[in-house]
Image (cartoon, grey):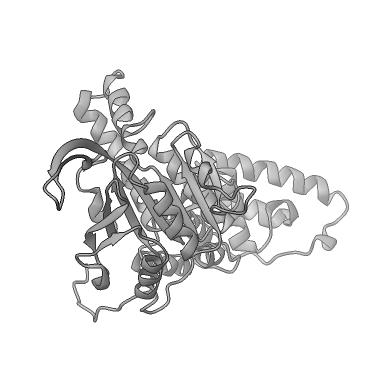
Amino acid sequence: MNFSFTPATRQQSKARIALEGPSGSGKTFTALTLATTMDDRVALIDTERGSASKYAVGKNGQGFAFDTLQMTKFDPRDLVGALAAAGQAGYGAVVVDSLSHFWMGIGGMLELVDAIGKRGGGGGNFGGWKEARPFERQMIDALLAYPGHIIVTMRTKAEWVIEEDARGKKQVRKIGTKAEQREGLEYEFDIVGDLDQENTLVISKTRCPELTGGVINRPGEDLAATVLEWLADGSSVPAVAELVAASQDPNLTFEGARELHQKAERYRLLGAAILHPVTGEPLTFGQLITERGRALRAASAQPQTPARPLASVPPGGAEQQASALDELRTAASAAGMTPQDLEEGFQAQYGKPTTEAADEQLRAMTATLTRGAA
């Protein structure tokens, strides 16, 4: 491992904001105010039985313009999928309202750990945490690597306190104490604020110097403008969509895939949730480029056989090609390759899909796979 130090470089980034507060403190309203100021296209992942839609634009033209996704079960892996779909659709800001459900809601982390621990060989509570913790880590990575702004709300446990006002009169006030979420999650966000019943935001943690010690009543456009100015001060960062497109370049080499992996790691984008370009299934960019690299490495071990134009195939060649293709697919399956791995490897080697290849090319790769399996 290389332990050489290099000068730190400030990079442009997207908002990572967490809003904590008890019921009635205005978390959803504040999150939508910030999100719609930061970007024109906003998606809200709703875990609160559709309550956020009450803030949508009404007949009088008042309200927020946003799209919503209703969720009723809260497996952290499902949030990764939702973020992948939002990124694919190009939403510039995503609100998760609320993130607490993926901890204590139906199918959330606590229930997931309990279910794993109770199954045969699950190892009890300890085994449940050991197996489920990576799912939570993937969820957090997907939040932090999302290609747009992320604002999450988190419920806090409420307590009632008796205070004296400025005139010495006693009054009862509801306050939030501790977020219903994993201990220490707030460290993952750049800005964390606590909202009270008067919709006053107290900044409890920030990496933005202008917000240090901030107490903001009815936070809105001014706060969003301050955050955007701070985020824009730095060098540009590659878009996740550009990395995905580069990973699918038919001329990409194994070394090129390795460089893409290193680039994504440098910009902390390996955990970005995306949809697979072929299958449409959610996964991370790190998983995609690793899959692509393996296919390219397998292809690089194949012997280079000159391509023969399809027009030069002699009579009966179509039948020979069909037979060669069957043999290749059988050999690939025996070697543990999926059909997708086979197609990607063949495309990288010969620049065409297997269905358009000459039988000589098909048989050459079959021979290589057979030797490798042996």
Is 52 on the left or on the right of 113, as rendered?
A: right
Q: Quadrant of residue 236?
A: bottom left
Question: Quick check: 281 left or right of 158?
Answer: right
For residue 177, what is the image quadrant? top left
Residue 321 position in % (x across, y down): 76, 49
The spot of residue 301 in percent (x, y) is 50, 60
Residue drawn where x is 59% and y is 62% of the image: 348
Residue occupying the point 21% across, 26% down: 125
Counting labels gives 0
239 to 342, vertically: above or below: below
Indicate left or right for 360 with 298 as reference.
right
User: Does residue 125 sit above or below 25 in this rendering?
Assistant: above
Query: Residue drawn at (82%, 51%), measured in percent from left and top?
Result: 317
The answer to whether residue 190 is visible is no
Give the farthest residue toward the bottom: 7
User: Residue 154 location, x and y as percent?
Assistant: 32, 44
Q: Is residue 170 above or below residue 234?
A: above
Residue 337 lies, in percent from the top left, at 52, 44
Which of 107 and 293 lies nearest the eye of the viewer? Answer: 107
Q: Is residue 183 left or right of residue 91?
A: left
Taking 159 as reference, is 43 above or below it? below
Report if residue 106 is visible in the image: yes
Please tell me which residue lies in front, 145 or 128.
145
Q: Quadrant of the N terminus?
A: bottom left
- Observer-nearest residue: 323 or 74? 74
